[in-house]
Amino acid sequence: MTKLDPTNCHTDLSQIRPDCIVSTIEKIEARIASTLPNRNLSHIASQLQLIAINTAKSASTINKPNIPLRAITVSLILAMISIITYLVAHLHFTDASAWEILEGADAAISSVIYIGIATIFFITLEARLKRRKALKALHQLRVIAHIIDMHQLTKDPEHFVHNQLQNNDTTDFNNLTPYKLGRYLDYCSELLSMTSKIAALYAQNTQDSIILASVNEIEHLSTGLSRKIWQKIMILDQHILHPHQADPNNKKVDQLSSADFH
C-alpha cells in the first residue's frame, strides 16, 4: 500500500482509495479509545481496520488477470485453430472415400468440441474464482456490520428518558453517561459507514453482477442499521442533552455542536 497523502484523499475523486479508508478507521479507533476507553467497540474498530488492510490487498489481486489460467485458455484456442487448419489442409476429397472423410471429420469435430468446452471452462473459471474470493470477503463485512449492530442494540436512550433501566441491561450500559452514549452510538454509525466503504472497493473495478449485488446489499444493510442508530441519537439529543429543543414555546434553541456527534 502506498503512503497516505491526506490531501489527495479529499481531492482524488476518481476512485475509492483503500489507504484513505484505513486512515479514517484508524482515526475513528483513536477517538473511541480516547472517549470510551476499555470498550469492546475499540476492538471492533481495530478489527475493521485490519479487514480494510486485507481488503486493499485482495481487491487489487482480484482485479489483476490470472496469467496461468489465461495462458491455458490461449493454448486451448490455438489448439482448436490448429486442428481446424490441419483438417482443411490435409483432407483431400478426391483421394479419400466418403467413409474416410466422415471418420476424419467426426474425429476433428469431436476434438474441437471437447477443446471448446475446456476453453469455456477455463474462461469462466477465472471469473468464478475471483467472485468466490470477493463474496467470502463481503460475507465477513456483512457479519461485522451485524456485530456492530449488536453492540448498540442494548444502548437505549429511552432509559434515560424514563430515568430507569430495564432488567436485562448490563453494567456496561450503566457506566455510560448520556453524552458518552451519544458518542458510542455515533461511533457505531461511523463504523457501519466505513464497512460499506470497504465493500465498495470490490465494486469499483468489476462488472460482475453478483459481486455488485452483494456490495449493494451490504450498503443497504449498513444504511438501515445506521438509520436506527440515528433515531436513538435524535431521541437522546432532544430529551436528554438538549431537552428545551423539544419545547416549541422555548425560543432559545441550542444547536448540536460538531464536537458532540462528529
Image: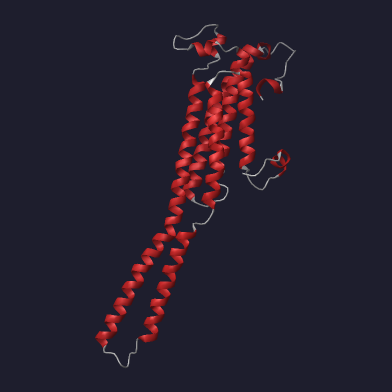
Q: Please say if 66 is above or below 140.
A: below
Residue located at (60% from left, 11% from top)? 177
Direction from residue 9 to residue 29 in the image, left or right:
left
The answer to whether any part of residue 202 appears in the image is no
Quadrant housing the C terminus: top right
Q: Residue at x 56, y 48 (%)?
A: 60
Q: Position of residue 22 (x, y in %)?
A: 61, 36
Residue 105 visible in the current orientation: yes
Q: State the colouring used for the structure image.
A: secondary structure
Where is residue 14 shown, x and y percent of the image? 66, 48
Which image quadrant for residue 258?
top right
Apparent side of residue 149 relative to residue 247 in the rendered image (left or right): left
Which residue is at 47% across, 36% downward? 140
Q: Decide which of 189, 76 is in the foreground and name it.
A: 76
Residue 247 relative to residue 110: left or right: right
Residue at image location 44% in from the left, 9% down from the top: 167
Q: Nearer the viewer, residue 61 or 167?
A: 61
Position above or below: 195 against 95: above
Q: Position of residue 233 (x, y in %)?
A: 60, 20
Among all residues in the image, which is located at the extreme left? 99
159 in relation to 117, above or below:
above
Q: Position of residue 232 (x, y in %)?
A: 57, 20
Residue located farthest toward the bottom when viewing the structure as drawn: 94
Please identify the quarter of the rendering in which residue 17 is found: top right
Question: Residue most toward the top?
Answer: 163
- Total number of numbered discs in the rendering: 0
For the N terminus, which image quadrant? top right
